[in-house]
Image (cartoon, rainbow, N blue to C red):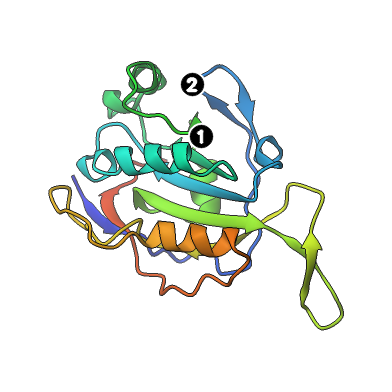
Amino acid sequence: MVLMESESESELEAGDAAPDFELEGVDGNSYSLESFADNEALLVVFTCNHCPYAQAKFDLLNELAAEYDDIAVVGINSNDAEEYAADSFEVMCDRVEEGTIQYDAYLRDESQDVARAYGAVCTPDPFLFARAAQRDADDRAVEPRDDAGFELVYHGRLDDALNPDDEPTRFHIREAIDAVLTGEEVDLEWQPSQGCSIKWKDE
């Protein structure tokens, strides 16, 4: 296990558009950004099955998916499953079937291209996007766009429990989501998430 923090040279910045993707979900369906166009916000979390840091956040992500109707919680597993069999698509399906993972979608990034496009580094690595708004001449938001455009409003830790056995006392992601849903700016410092490194394939 290699411990990493979620900072990378290709890191997305506030206001950047969510990179699109087309990935297979454990339910057999293919998902893209358009699949979540009816949601006010999109929480993309690069995660996996085996990392204890990722496992420690399963319950929180399940709760978010259940509690917030206007938010889509999407887990993306980009790990090399040939070297880490516990992160295979089959085991992903098992985790969902047994109820361990209950996100709105759990997707497999076999090529690892999506993780690279987002600049993901560790598991878990969360990115919160809000529906992008049209803007007037003074760059003020006017109204939500009709397309599936999402813009980054928060990239950082889910809560302040950085180690798997820690109990959180503050949930940064809830604060960010609540701000989005009330139309406020997400006024949070982007402190890096902490977890196992994404298991990249040998090039």
Image coordinates for residue 121, horizontal then vertical, percent: 38, 54
Q: In the visual, does 133 lie left or right of 65?
A: right
The answer to which of 190 and 170 lies nearer the viewer is 170
Instruction: State the residue in front, 34 or 140.
Output: 140
Residue 111 is marked as 1
Specify few, some or many for label 1: CA neighbours under 10 Å numbering under 14, 14-19, or 20 or more.
Answer: some
Residue to which mark 2 is pinned: 26
Q: CA distance from mark 1 to mark 2?
A: 16 Å
The residue sitting at 59% across, 58% down in the picture is 181
Query: Label 2: how many residues lie within 10 Å, few (<14), some (14-19) or many (20+)?
Result: many
Is label 2 in a helix, a strand or a loop?
A: loop
| Quadrant assignment, res 12 | bottom right
Residue 42 seen in the current view = yes
Q: Is residue 188 left or right of residue 151?
A: left
Residue depicted at x 63% and y 64%: 16
Where does residue 168 sit, x and y in percent of width and height?
A: 22, 56
* Relative height, residue 192 to residue 104 (above, below): below
Q: Residue furthest left?
A: 165
172 to 67, vertically: above or below: below
Query: Could one spot residue 201 in this view of the protein?
Result: no
Q: At label 2, which amino acid type do we have?
A: Val
Q: Earlier in the sequence, mark 1 or mark 2?
A: 2
The quarter in which the C terminus is drawn is top left
